[in-house]
Image (spheres, rainbow, N blue to C red):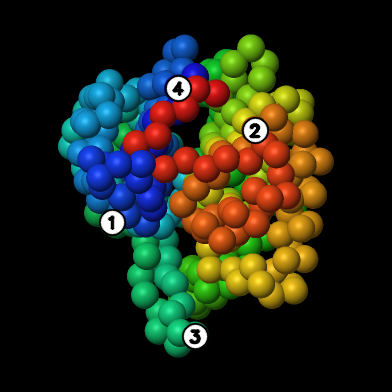
């Protein structure tokens, strides 16, 4: 399986534009998949330079309802006329971020796309075929990212409270009964997501690729070090072969975890890996 990073916070070359966000192209035996779109049309311009034809995509996945993962959806729907787009139920709800503890800033998706007939809304587990499974409804409270505290959602009663991330979904790719797990930001906690993936697959997780939402953590603080130490221990005990992280993990947290773990690497815009 080939994974091409179309859009990420950093880049391997000035040839590829980078911004805060994520978009991956995944090529398997049977499918050509777009996982997230980044903030705008940048992923499409990078795709062209990287030899990825977005018209050939047969399945797209939007991991959750934030613009840095689905802001390029309109661009994709214009370029590609056929692919179904799997997206979490509630992804088009009103999502906000709290800045400086006071200001609330919208970070949601373009509402005018919500009724597009190519969207497939997911709220639990959808088995597409023998190769692909998409799942949400992740339970558990192990090591949920502390950065979630700034992320809000408007609920049906019009109240604005912490986002429950019911709209977050993840992708499993099966190759010879060994699975690769793709997540956008792991807002529900990467350990909780892996735990559910193991239930679905029987425990055969070969690779995990995605953001862990640790950006902004002060790795010099005792409580942060304790959190990251526990996270690294849990990741290692999960018996995943290889982790590739990116985007919202943050460089400081990545560097700290990388010192603790032998099977953790990072990906950047323009990078191509075989998993």
Circle 3 SS class: loop
Position of residue 43 in the picture relative to residue 209 (left or right): left
Disc 3 versus disc 2: nearer the observer? 2
Distance from label 4 to label 2 (Cα)? 15 Å
Q: Earlier in the sequence, mark 4 or mark 2?
A: 4
Q: Earlier in the sequence, mark 4 or mark 1?
A: 4
Distance from label 4 to label 3 (Cα)? 41 Å
Say which residue appears at 30% left-offset and 41% top-offset: 13
Distance from label 2 to label 1 (Cα)? 35 Å
Q: Earlier in the sequence, mark 4 or mark 3?
A: 4
The answer to whether mark 4 and mark 1 are in CB contact below 8 A is no
Examine the rendered structure and indicate whether residue 197 appears above or below residue 260.
above
| The image quarter in which residue 222 lies | bottom right
Residue beneath label 4, please? 2
Distance from label 3 to label 2 (Cα)? 37 Å
Position of residue 132 in the picture relative to residue 59 (left or right): right
Disc 2 versus disc 1: nearer the observer? 2
The answer to whether mark 3 and mark 2 are in CB contact below 8 A is no
Q: Earlier in the sequence, mark 2 or mark 1?
A: 1
Residue beneath label 2, please? 242
Residue beneath label 1, please? 110
Residue 87, position in %: x, y? 44, 43
Circle 4 SS class: strand
Camera-side residue: 242 or 39?
242
Camera-side residue: 167 or 36?
36
């Amino acid at each position: 399986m080939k994974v091409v990073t179309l859009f990420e916070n950093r880049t391997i070359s000035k040839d590829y534009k980078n911004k805060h966000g994520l978009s991956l192209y995944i090529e398997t035996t049977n499918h050509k998949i777009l996982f997230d779109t980044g903030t705008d049309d940048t992923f499409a311009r990078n795709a062209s330079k990287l030899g990825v034809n977005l018209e050939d995509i047969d399945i797209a996945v939007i991991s959750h309802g934030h613009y840095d993962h689905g802001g390029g959806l309109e661009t994709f729907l214009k370029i590609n006329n056929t692919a179904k787009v799997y997206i979490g139920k509630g992804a088009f709800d009103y999502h906000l971020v709290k800045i400086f503890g006071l200001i609330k800033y919208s970070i949601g998706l373009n509402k005018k796309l919500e009724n597009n007939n190519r969207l497939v809304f997911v709220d639990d587990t959808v088995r597409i075929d023998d190769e692909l499974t998409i799942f949400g409804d992740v339970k558990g409270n192990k090591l949920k990212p502390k950065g979630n505290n700034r992320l809000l959602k408007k609920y049906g009663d019009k109240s604005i409270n912490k986002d429950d991330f019911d709209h977050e979904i993840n992708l499993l790719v099966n190759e010879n009964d060994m699975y690769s797990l793709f997540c956008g930001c792991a807002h529900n906690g990467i350990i909780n997501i892996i735990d559910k993936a193991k239930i679905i697959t029987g425990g055969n997780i070969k690779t995990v690729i995605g953001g862990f939402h640790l950006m902004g953590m002060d790795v010099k603080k005792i409580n942060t070090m304790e959190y990251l130490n526990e996270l690294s221990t849990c990741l290692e005990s999960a018996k995943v072969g290889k982790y590739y992280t990116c985007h919202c993990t943050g460089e400081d947290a990545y560097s700290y975890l990388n010192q603790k773990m032998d099977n953790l690497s990072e990906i950047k815009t323009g990078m191509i890996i075989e998993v």
